[in-house]
Image (cartoon, helix red, strand yellow):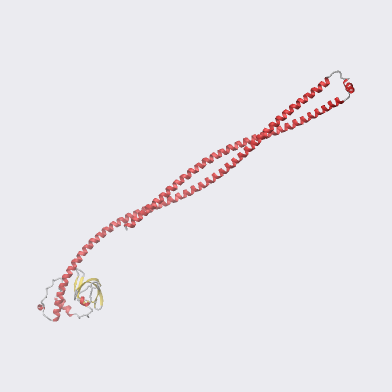
Amino acid sequence: MEQKTKFIVIGLIGFSVICLFLFVSALSSKQVLIRERNDLKTENTSLNAKIGKLEVSMRDYDKKIASLNQDLQQATQEKSDLQAKNAEITKSRDDLAARLKKTQDQPQVARQEVAAPVTNDAYWAGIIKTKADLELQANNLRTELKNIQIANESLSREKIALELEVKNLNHERDDLKRQLDYNKQMTDSISQELVRERNDKSKIQDSFKTLKNENTILTRQIRTLNANRTELEKKVQQVQEDKSGVERRVNEMESILTDRMGQIDTLKQQIDTVRSGKPLEETKDSVELPAIIVKPSSQQMELQSLPQPDHKAGRILAVNRDNNFVIVDLGQASGVKTGDVLKVYRDDKNIGYLEVIQVRQDISACDIKKESAGLKIGDIIR
């Protein structure tokens, strides 16, 4: 019982330690998940801020690209206008050159006739001046056209660079979106894990409470068992003391039975002497029995007057109510052994049971185990 109680206590302690370890591990994993979630939230916030900045930068770049496209269109328009003006100037110059060449190819007479009405060179001076102005304008237009082409090329390069930068920004934005989606998925998974951890924690707490209650109940039971054990030990000690007393009483009874058996042997010899018709004084070994064993002479006469049973049956010779035993006239010669159970009959009716506790040659001492009527001398036993 004590070993079983120890095993129960050790099992409860081990189970409690395992539950405590699981609870601590769940708590630490929960704290790690909370820290990871906070880190992801911080990273998500910074990424959102970066995305906002990139969107603002992209809007600025879009505005710049729009303005550059507008400037490019305006420069292209100006270029087209300048090219048209240049074409007109070139055409005028070609016309003027043709006219000059035609004039130079005419005969000298016609030249003199034409020049006759003119009294000065004002006309030719104006033509030369106009030609110089046109050439100057043409040169200016060529310079402006070259500048516009250079500006257009630089704008094209800037446009290409801006387009590349916009593409890079778009790639970064896509990467940031993918990272945001991944962080969102991670946050959702961590949230689900936190929910599961919370549920597991609640289950562990419930099981811990249940185990605590069971531990309390088992502790009370152990205390009750210890108290019962103490009481049982006291009862066992009392039973041992009673057993010692009973053993002493049995030893005393055995000594008394030994003495009584000797006296009963003497009594049987006297009874046999009486039956044979010899006078009692002629018996050499006759012994006067004490009053507690020897019955009145009327009982002896009654015993002599009873019918003799067969060799397998016997009679009760003496009854001792104080020590709850009887003496019968069956012994080793009749095959009686210690421990045999004998039945008691009166008028062919079973009225009790006896257990043989000591055996002599012709008599035995029997313990009264059961009786439905009071046993008396002369009852038949088998």
Left or right of residue 44: residue 202: left
Task: Residue at 85% x, 25% y: name it.
Answer: 104
Extreme left residue here?
A: 281
Quadrant location of the C terminus in the rendered image = bottom left
Determine the image quadrant of residue 59: top right
Find residue 121 and report its horizontal and vertical position in percent.
84, 19
| Quadrant where the image shows the N terminus | bottom left
In the rendering, at what x and y percent does residue 365 appear?
A: 20, 72
Q: Judge whether 200 appears above or below 361 on screen.
A: above
Q: Position of residue 315 (x, y in %)?
A: 20, 77
Side of 351 where 124 appears, left or right: right
Kindly identify the residue that appears in the image at 33 percent across and 56 percent down: 5
Residue closest to the eye, 289 or 306? 289
Q: Position of residue 356 (x, y in %)?
A: 23, 72
Residue 330 appears anywhere in the view: no
Residue 105 appears anywhere in the view: yes
Viewer-closest of 306 and 241 = 241
Which of 38/140 is in front? 140
Horizontal side, residue 35 vs residue 9: left or right: right
Among the 4 quarters of the image, the one containing residue 354:
bottom left
Residue at the far top in the pictured view: 119
From the viewer's side, name the closer residue of 43 and 255: 43
Taking 342 as reference, is 250 above or below it?
A: above
Residue found 49% across the figure and 43% down from its top:
36
Q: How many marks?
A: 0
Left or right position of 149 against 54: right
**Looking at the image, is 45 positioned above or below residue 115?**
below
